[in-house]
Structures are given as C-alpha cells and as structure tokens.
Image (tube, rainbow, N blue to C red):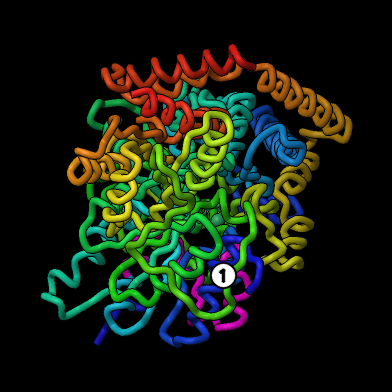
Amino acid sequence: MKELTVIQAIHDAMRLAMERDERVMLLGEDVGKNGGVFRASEGLQERFGEHRVVDTPLAESAIVGTAVGLAVAGMRPIAEIQFLGFIYEAMDQIASQAARIRFRSYGQYTVPLVIRAPYGGGVRTPELHSDSLEALFLHTPGLKVVTPSNPYDAKGLLLAAIEDPDPVLFFEPLKLYRAFRAEVPEDWYTVPIGKARVVAEGTDVTLIGWGPTVPVIAQAAKRLDEERGYSCEVIDLRTISPMDTDAIVASVEKTGRAVVVHEAVLSGGVGAEVAARIQERAFFSLEAPVVRVTGYDTPYPVPSIEDVWLPDVERVMAAVEETMRI
Amino acid sequence: MKTYAACEPVPVYRVLAEDGSLVGEAPDLSGERLVELYRWMVLTRIFDQRALNLQRQGRIGTYAPFSGQEAAQIGSFAALDPQDWVFTSYRELAGVMFHGFPMETALLYTMGHPEGTKSPADRRIFPVQIVIAAQLLHAVGAGWACRLRGERSIATAYFGDGATSQGDFHEAMNFAAVFRIPVVFFCQNNFWAISVPFTKQMATPTVAQKALAYGMEGVLVDGNDVLAVYAAMKRAVDRARAGEGPTLIEAVTYRLGPHTTADDPTRYRDEAEWRKWRDERDPIPRFRKFLETRGLWSEEEERHWQEEAKRRVEEAVVRAESYPKPNPASVFDHVYGTVPPDLARQKAAFERRMNRREGRE
Ligand SMILES: Cc1ncc(C[n+]2csc(CCOP(=O)(O)OP(=O)(O)O)c2C)c(N)n1
Ligand SMILES: [Mg+2]
C-alpha cells in the first residue's frame, strides 16, 4: 500500500495498464512531453514512447473519433479531453458514434474506449473549465459514466474502465486531484462499474453525491450528527451510468428521506433522474419529498461568484433540515 | 500521373530587418501614426508584465500573457476601422486594448468579474473566446451580415497555430471562400500550443498555404515586423471591403512568456530558442531602431513614455481594483432576455440565502 493523491492514483492506473497491455495507449493535448496540464501522465511518454503516449494536434473531435477507430480495430485507447467543458467539440463522436457502434453493428464491433476529463469547480479556473456535464452522457444509451471521489476508487475505477468492453467516460473532479492522500494498493485491482458506495451508514436521511460533492455531503453529515443529532447515510454514487438504483432504493427504504447533491445545473441534472427512480421504487417509504442541492440554472459563473453558486455544506444542511421538518 | 504535391514556397513578407533597417516598402503611414503604434507596443508590453506581476501577488486570476506578439496584434488592428467586427481568443489583449478595449476591463476579466467581457458601446469586440477556433465561424457570420446589411464593415478572427487543427477552422475557411465573405482570418503562429510545437500541430511548413485549398489568398508575414503586418492586414481588409472575399494571414511570431500563469514552459521549450526570440527578434526594439533612424523617436522620448505608460497602467489597476464588486445575484440576469418563472424563484431563494449569510457575517 502507498499513500497517493487522486492524480497519483490515476497516473498509477495508466502506468500499470500500459505495462500490462501493449494495446493501451493515451492520446490527447499536452499529455506527452508536458505530462498533461495536471501532470496525470507525467513521465509516461518517456517510459512508453511517443507512439503510446501521443501529443495530438488540437482537435477534440479528432482525438475521440480516431480513438473510436483505434478501439474498434484492436487497440485500447485512453483519450484525454483537457477539460470537460471542451467535450462538446467531440459530442458527435461520443454520442452518435462511440455510443452506438455495438448497437448499429448488431454486436459485431465494440468500442473499448476510455475518455478521461477533469471537471468541477471551486478552483478559480477561467470560463468553461469548471462545467459538470455528466447528465449529457447519462442521457446517451451505450455509454458508461464513472467519477471517483477518492484515490482508491480513482485507480480501481480507471482500471475497470480500461478493462471494460464498452466506451467509458471517466470524469475526474479536479478540485480533489491533490486534496488529500489515501492508501492505494500497488497492484492491479478494479472497483466495479455500476456500484455505489455507502460512505457512512445512517437512519434519518440519505445524502447522495458523486465526485466533487462527496466530501461536501460527508462533511454535512458529520456536522448534522454533531449539531443536530441527525443520522445521515452518505452514498457516493461513483457510477452515473449505469446507475446503482438498488443501492439508492435500499437506503431510502431505510431512511425515508433523500437529498441529492451535484455541482451541475439543476434542470435535467442527474439529481432529477435519482429523484425519479426513488419515487418510482420507494414512493411508499418516503417521509418527505426528495430535495436537490445543485448549481443554479445558469452557465457556470465567473470565479468571483462560484463559491456561492456551488452547493456547499451549509446548503446541504439546510436541505436536510427542510426534509426533516416534514 | 500528375498529382498535387507541393506548392511553391513563398518568402515571409518583411519590411523591417531584425536590426530595424528597411528591407521592403514601408506602408503609407504618417510619422505621427508610426509613433502611436510604437507607443502602444510599449504600453501593452508594460501592461502585460504588470499583469503577470499582479497574478503572482494573487491580485488577478489566471492570465495569458502576449509579450512578444505586440507587433502582430497592433500592426493588424491598425488597419481596422472602429466599426469592424473583432473576434479574438484570450491572447489578443494588446490588439483589442489598442482598438479601444479599456485596460481596466481587461483586468476585471482576469479578476473573475462578470463585467470583464463587456465591449465599449462604440466598438464591436466579442468576448474573448476560450473554446479554441469557435470564433472563426462567428466572424464568418458577422462578415456575412455586414454584406447582407450593406455595411462597409468587415469581420476579423484572431487565433493561434493550434486553432488551425480544429474542424471549426476548416469549416470557417470553406464557408468564407464559398460565400466570398468579407472576413480576415489572422493566425498568430507563435510556434506553441501550450506544450505542442508547430511541427507536431501540422505537417505543412506554413499555415498560410492552407488558404490555397479553400480557394482564398494566403499571406505569410513576419509577425514581429509591425510594418509588414500592417501592410498585409491593410491589403486583406481592403480586399474584403471591396468584395474580393476572405484572406488567411499567418503572422510568424513567438510567445515569450508561459502559455498562461498556470503553465511552466521550461518543461517543454528549449531555452536557447526562447533566448533567441527574446534577444534578437523582439518586435519592440526592432521598430524603435527604425523610428530612431528616421528621427521620429529618441532616448529622451523613450524614458518619458516608459514612465507615462507605467502611470497609465497603474491608473488602470487602481480603477479595476476599486471597481464595485459584482452582485452575485446578477448571475441570473443575463441567461435570458426575460427571466423565466422557475429561474426567478431560484434567484429569489439565492438572494434570501445571500441576505442570511450577510446577516451572519
Ligand atoms: C476546444 C478547446 N480545447 C482545448 C483547450 C485548452 N487550450 C487552451 S489554449 C490551448 C492551446 C492553444 O494554442 P494556439 O491555438 O496556438 O494559441 P496560443 O495559446 O498559442 O495563442 C489549449 C489546448 C481549449 N481552450 N479549447
Ligand atoms: Mg500558439
């Protein structure tokens, strides 16, 4: 075991995968010589060569589109999008192409492709560098979407994504890249795609988050316990698609209350899908309406405003109070 | 079989040699105008260096310096009319400030203030483009509108060498040529797209030659020669106004600083290369020598202007730092022309929350 940060765990997973499987390659902007703008691939080009860690021309659609071809034809590409906000450039290649090739070829062709992208706010990036766009891909059948909130899951989920036969989007909360260290096994292991994690057990209310909001809900749960005596169950969804509905339902059947927290905007967000599934499958267990704590329905704001726009511990606590009053 | 294989290499267009001596035909500009261009190159360089400094002190946010590219920007903007459309990336501040964008507004942008993208009412400056190459298509559309509305104005798009790899670049070039749009595509080839060098960005030796494939004129110009840049841009602008269609200009230049304040160029860039551009090819001393031999500028005036420029930059810093802080609730105001009911409810809840916070603080 080693103590690693999230970014080191991602690096470790890519190194391990490239050591084990010659088909694994990384392509993207500034991933080679520069080691990625966040240093996720530091030293990998030196180690594995320019043909496996490729500095591409500046074109997201080409990065993903060629990765689709590489994957179909026998390679195991990891395509990096420098910031999730730029993934719109590659939207056709992801949603109309990668996501449907298995379906369109009646199972003949598959796309074992991983697309990595940093996302999330709170670190004063320039415009369009902080957007949370996970809902777009939940809304696209054929794609898997995962997002770790800690070093252990980062490595295990990324290795699972690389092993997966279908396209997996791997979204990295950039605020957590170097936020803390945790023990990570040195060997190969996977964290199953499609499984949520119960971070803390509780009986009064279920708090559901993923990626950058997991530390926020964990902190809120702690304070609600200390200050209000509420027992919160904390769930890290880890996989947005396919969603672990069973885990959500099991928890809400126990607590009767749920608060969903994400940085992405409210309308049409993943929170809406979580709430819909809860009312479909746990309606008679509910003591209160499901509450969402999210970004507001505006474009991501400028740095001087982002802190009050993003969901924070206080907003989560207020939402829990609201559900507990009923 | 005859194939298309290569085009004739075209020499880089140049008016001033690196030592400031005249090697081409000087464009028709008055002495006063020449001095004005020089003053702006110095002023914007001082602004840029000050901004880097402010960033290190934590007084502004991430900043993309343009030092080294002043001639490409000021020389080309000098050929525009105030009513021409301007679509730039994040690295053209020298040009847009010369064109009338206030220095303090530029600072507000890097401070993360929502008013930092607002164009002065009498200019048509679009907010800086973050998504590489997207602005090229907007410029084509704006130029198209100018023609449809019978305006004399044209549109310009500024972008880097990296931007030429995006589909938007190729699509914009093709639309512009097919519809003969009054637009100028101005590429500042500074040899780097963050850490990716020009030679890994494309397999052609120049950007300018790509114009051929779309059916428009391509110009290769020394971007550190302000007079050559002006002449190239003037020609392209005049042609656009005369209905002769679009032009692609490649201005060869160099970014002396980091990509942004978040970047460390020593990781990927050869120190000797950087030194050469800094010590031998800086556009400012080159132009200064030219002005001095013409008797248009002196040591005395230089000293004077350096001080005056610093004073102006400082004044802009003061104005930016004393500018009213944004009202966070304004984030709801410019999403739509009229705020829809649910968004109005979100805004009201947000304001209640802000008031409660303030009450506590
Ligand atoms: C669509 C998109 N992809 C990636 C980025 C990240 N990015 C910002 S600047 C840059 C390099 C741009 O290089 P170039 O076009 O040469 O312009 P320069 O910065 O040299 O002025 C990259 C990759 C972005 N802003 N937009
Ligand atoms: Mg460049």
Q: Quadrant of the N terminus of chain B?
A: bottom left
Give residue B145's position: percent from left, percent from top: 27, 32
Whether residue B259 is visible = yes
Whether residue B97 is visible = no
Q: Is residue B172 left or right of residue A142?
A: right
Quadrant containing ligand 2 reads bottom right
Identify the chain of the residue marked 1, using the numbered disc in the image: A
Q: Is residue B301 left or right of residue B282?
A: right
Residue A301 sits above or below residue B262 on the image? above
Give residue B62's position: percent from left, percent from top: 62, 42
Residue B70 sits above or below residue A16 on the image? above
Label 1 belongs to which residue? A11
Q: Quadrant of residue B49?
A: top right
- Give the magenta range: A39-65
Amino acid at the residue labelled 1:
His
Residue B101 sits above or below residue B186 on the image? above
Query: Is B29 covered by the magenta stretch?
Result: no
Question: Within 8 Å: ligand 1 and the Cβ of disc 1?
Answer: no
Query: Is A48 covered by the magenta stretch?
Result: yes
Residue nearest the viewer, comparing A147 with B280: A147
